[in-house]
Image (cartoon, rainbow, N blue to C red):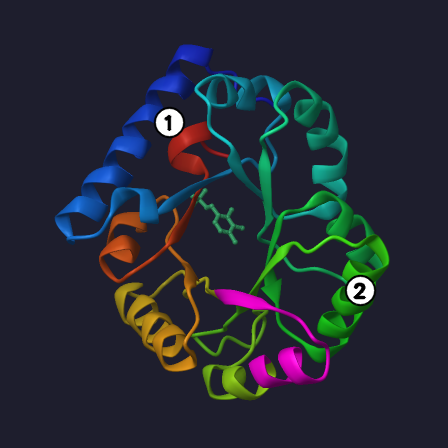
Amino acid sequence: MTNGDHPREVEGRYLTIKERVWRAAEASGREPAAVKLVAVTKTFEAEDILPVLRQGHVSFGENRVQEAMHKWPGLRELFPAIELHLIGPLQTNKVREAVALFDCIETVDRPKLAAALAAETKRQNRAPRLLIQVNTGLEQQKAGVAPADAEKFLEQCRREFGLTIGGLMCIPPFDEEPLPHFEALAALRNRLGLTELSMGMSADFETAIRAGATMVRVGTAIFGHR
Ligand SMILES: *Cc1c(COP(=O)(O)O)cnc(C)c1O
């Protein structure tokens, strides 16, 4: 679908969000360049994304491999600097396509997937940046490792599979105050000595930045409702 909005509206919302990201970083005494805005384009088409690409934006997030495969190769020919993040669950039978397409895979959460990623990154000689997804709310239906298992899984990724893990990602429960989840993820990131912290969406990215986010994933506030 397309959002039906005028390109100027998308451009305006994008510039506003960029400004808010900048200010939230400065307000918490952080270097604005240290917070990456990942524009989440799931369900939206090239037409909706172009106004943001034309502003020079390069970081984008998709939650489905199949959808991203249809959308992004064409756009990449026009904008070669594009950097794509996979922010949705990854099935092992899609790992080949995911490694070929994405520059960052934020949802590494189980040994079987880590093993498949290790084999495929070697085979393709490509090394997308990898983040471990942590299920901070311990939600039954949600992907991610439990916080208590994160250290063991990180060690396994390194020792058993030879993967380099860049940081952590979380999606707090919808119906809860996000701040405690952001703080818990930041504390875990510090304890594990990792760098990246992907957290915060349209409704709470400023809170996430205050808690230390190095990547925020914003869709609706830029592209409109899905
Ligand atoms: C869709 C999605 C987002 C963006 O959410 P908005 O509320 O539209 O900003 C962020 N992270 C993940 C994992 C998503 O699936």
Q: Position of residue 54 (x, y in %)?
A: 49, 16
Q: Position of residue 33 (x, y in %)?
A: 32, 42
Q: Could you tell which of marks 1 and 2 lies nearer the N-terminus?
A: 1
Occupied quadrant, residue 123: bottom right
Q: Position of residue 2 (x, y in %)?
A: 58, 22
Residue type at mark 2? Thr
Report the residue marked by disc 2. Answer: 92
The magenta region covers 154-167
Mark 2 neighbour class, 10 Å CA radius: few under 14, some 14 to 19, many 20 or more: some
Residue 127 lies left or right of residue 133; in this view the side is right
Mark 1 neighbour class, 10 Å CA radius: few under 14, some 14 to 19, many 20 or more: many
Report the residue marked by disc 1. Answer: 14
Indicate yes or no: mark 2 CB to ligand 1 under 8 Å.
no
The residue shown at (77%, 43%) is 66
Q: Quadrant of the N terminus?
A: top right
The residue shown at (25%, 39%) is 22
Q: Position of residue 20 (x, y in %)?
A: 24, 37
The residue shown at (40%, 57%) is 199
Which sits in the foreground, 59 or 126?
Answer: 126
Q: Is residue 196 magenta?
A: no
Residue type at mark 1? Tyr
Residue 209 lies left or right of residue 2; in this view the side is left
